Image (cartoon, grey):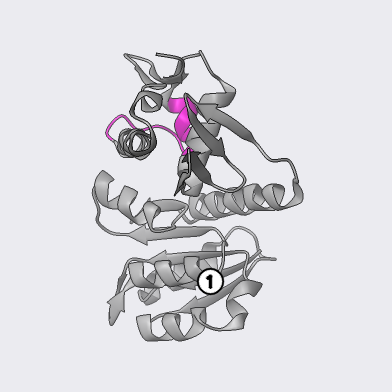
Amino acid sequence: MDILIIEDDKLICESIQRLWPVPSDNLRFISTYKQSINFVHGSELKMFDGAIVDIHLPDGDGLTTLRTIRENTDVPIVLISGSGTANSRADAIDLGADDYVMKPFSIRELQARMARLVAVRNRKERSTRREQFTIGRVACDLQKRTISHTETEAPLTDTEARILGYLYRNRNINCSKSSLYKNAFFRDYDPSDKTLDVYISRLRKKIAKLDQWSSEWIQTARGAGYRYSEP
């Protein structure tokens, strides 16, 4: 893999360089917001398989860098940060990040998460199959990353699409939070992590804006997780 790493902490960069578990991967380091903005507007950005971005850069906001990367390419993006609530992590993912890792982190885990995201993207690009279904009266197109009703359409983030797709493929079955975390966020479930709950709430609101009744198809399975089922 060719990975772009935007991180200002020299010790973290040195650790990533030294401990990255796949020697054949090419790592490109950028340390400032100004450098990152100049870089992500260039054509070289599309040569990378993925990007790792620190939210807190010394001369600017990493979230702006995230937004700019996402406007120019669909490569997987993993955010890293030393702070953040479940809501702030969900907000960052809404801006286009595919995953969010808190400092201090395992470099082996960071590489594994990125490799997983790159593999998912590559499979998606190789596949010409379009997965379409309805949530009540709302049409969902996972390939286009959209939901629509009548003549109104709303976009889905990659994570939202993975959640809806997993719930639909397991319709009428209670989906545990553990299984949803593994399939939507590619990590183990931590009971203190409310990111999934935030996503479900936002998905319901997004669907409800198109059709209120259809949002009731995403149900809470108390004590179990969530399910896709007719209300």
Answer whether residue 1 is magenta in the image: no
Tag 1 secondary structure: helix
Question: On the image, numbered disc 1 is attached to which residue?
Answer: 72
Q: Magenta part of the protein: which range? A: 178-192
Residue 211 in the image, given as x and y percentages of width and height = 38, 32
Crowd rating for badge 1 (residues with CA inside 10 Å; few <14, some 14–19, many 20+): some
Residue 31 in the image, given as x and y percentages of width and height = 40, 80
- Residue drawn at x 40%, y 72% as measured from the top left: 65
Q: Is residue 7 above or below residue 204?
A: below
Residue 47 in the image, given as x and y percentages of width and height = 65, 73
How many numbered marks appear? Answer: 1
Left or right: residue 21 compared with residue 200: right
Q: Is residue 99 above or below residue 200?
A: below
Q: Nearer the viewer, residue 186 or 137?
A: 137
Q: Nearer the viewer, residue 135 or 92?
A: 135
Quadrant assignment for the N terminus: bottom right
